Amino acid sequence: MASVPRSEVLPVQVSGLGVRLGAREVLAGVTFRLEPELRTVILGANGAGKTTLLRALHGLVPSTGSIRWAGGEREPRAEAMVFQQPVMLRRGALANVEYALAVNGVRGAERRRRAMEALERAGLSALAERPARVLSGGERQRLALARAWALRPRILYLDEPTASLDPGAAAAVEQEIAAIHASGTRIVMTTHRLGLARRFADEILFLDGGRLVEQTPADRFFEAPRSKEARQFLQGELP
């Protein structure tokens, strides 16, 4: 997999991030720093605000507070996001990737080359002309990852990338995510699968009730979480 240049836009400093949806406060006062090269997994009970945090980081929901990239403003072309249920266009797998590149200004032969490379790295070359909407769940998720990776983002936000997948499909998706990280893209991911978090994370962001309770190295979080909320979560006492 071709490498992404080590990012001059990192670290990212998030300060006092808040999100309200109607009358409900979903996130409040969330402050943390994303350093280069680490793999961050966001954990928390259902309704803790994990997906909303990803969407706020990517600029998809109105928020208060600030998100600053290496002392400057957000750089939209430096980031991408893959959703739990990715939206596929009514066209082939290759055309889905090419469309994303075209929208982002990649033209001609370079667009086709990057799209084909992304499919090859995802193990989807043989399905290049197959309609994306008839692919299996695991294949669609790998295609969504390939489509995002083709853009060469500095940060890739992933919302529950292995949810609802069988073990084989989940393993293939996890392998692709690891390859994307190895290419130089910073990964920030939510998951409800603690096994995936243990295998993949360098650090954990733990949310409870829309507030950031811990930002902790992953091994320390699983061995000796600092907060009562995190201990209850790991012991299965929270939903």
Image (cartoon, rainbow, N blue to C red):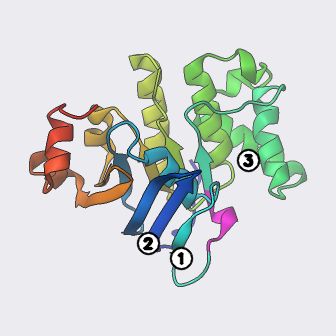
Residue 90 versus residue 110: which sits nearer the camera? 90
Q: Position of residue 169 (x, y in %)?
A: 47, 21
- In primary-sequence order, the first of circles 3 and 1 is 1
Q: Is residue 120 left or right of residue 180?
A: right
Quarter-of-image position of residue 196? top left
Q: Is residue 111 left or right of residue 168?
A: right
- Residue type at mark 2 is Gly
The answer to whether residue 22 is above or below residue 122 is: below
The answer to whether residue 222 is above or below residue 227 is: above
Residue at left offset 53%, top offset 76%: 68
Q: CA distance from mark 2 to mark 3?
A: 38 Å
Question: Would you say residue 168 is visible in this rendering?
Answer: yes
Q: Is residue 75 magenta?
A: yes
Disc assigned to residue 114? 3
Would you say the residues marked 2 and 3 are in contact, meaning their CB atoms lie under 8 Å apart? no
Say how many tags the image has: 3
Residue at left offset 49%, top offset 35%: 161
Residue 232 versus residue 107: which sits nearer the camera? 232
- In primary-sequence order, the first of circles 2 and 1 is 2
- Residue type at mark 3 is Arg
- Residue type at mark 1 is Arg
The quadrant of the picture occupied by the C terminus is top left
Give the extent of the magenta segment: 74-79
Q: Which residue is mark 2?
A: 16
Between marks 3 and 1 in the image, the one whose residue lies nearer the viewer: 1
Q: Residue furthest front?
A: 23
